[in-house]
Amino acid sequence: MNTQTGQPSLEFVSCPHPEGQHRMAYWRWGDAQARHVVVCVHGLTRQGRDFDRLAQALIEKSPHPLQVICPDVVGRGQSPAKFPVGHGGRAASWRWPCLPSAGQSLARE
């Protein structure tokens, strides 16, 4: 997070795919060095910035350094639509051993 503006940092992770690697964008809130990580994944037609208010609240209320990661899945937000839309990222690419997460349903309403 940019501490001067209170805005998240836009970053990218390389994700494996049967048709080759692709880059997935994600928004990082908080301390990039924090060991405590929350991942918030949006629903099928949304984007990572949908979690801005939640991410800010989690950072403000956390008793310890925290980072909140909000990916833009393939074809949404800042992620290129190289492959069909879907959840193509793998947490292992980020090298975090255990991830609490928040998300939205991909089911039909």
Image (tube, helix red, strand yellow):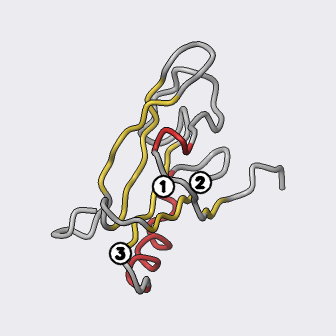
From the top left corner, tell me how far across and down residue 33 is, in percent: 30, 61
Judging by the rendered image, the residue that carries numbered circle 3 is 65
Name which residue type carries label 3.
Pro
Q: Answer whether labels 1 and 3 touch (C-beta < 8 Å).
A: no
Q: Secondary structure at mark 1?
A: strand
From the top left corner, tell me how far across and down residue 106 is, in percent: 75, 49
Judging by the rendered image, the residue that carries numbered circle 2 is 41
Q: Secondary structure at mark 2?
A: strand
Of the 4 image quadrants, the one containing the C terminus is bottom right
Closest to the observer: 35 or 44?
35
Of the 4 image quadrants, the one containing the N terminus is bottom left
Q: Could you tell me which residue is drawn at 52 percent across and 26 percent down?
A: 81
In space, the residues marked 2 and 1 are separated at their CA atoms by 6 Å
* Residue 35, quarter of the rendered image: bottom left
Task: Relative to 21, say whether 93 is above or below.
Answer: below
The earlier-in-sequence mark between 2 and 1 is: 2
Q: Answer whether labels 2 and 1 touch (C-beta < 8 Å).
A: yes
Name which residue type carries label 2.
Val
Residue found farthest to the left? 4
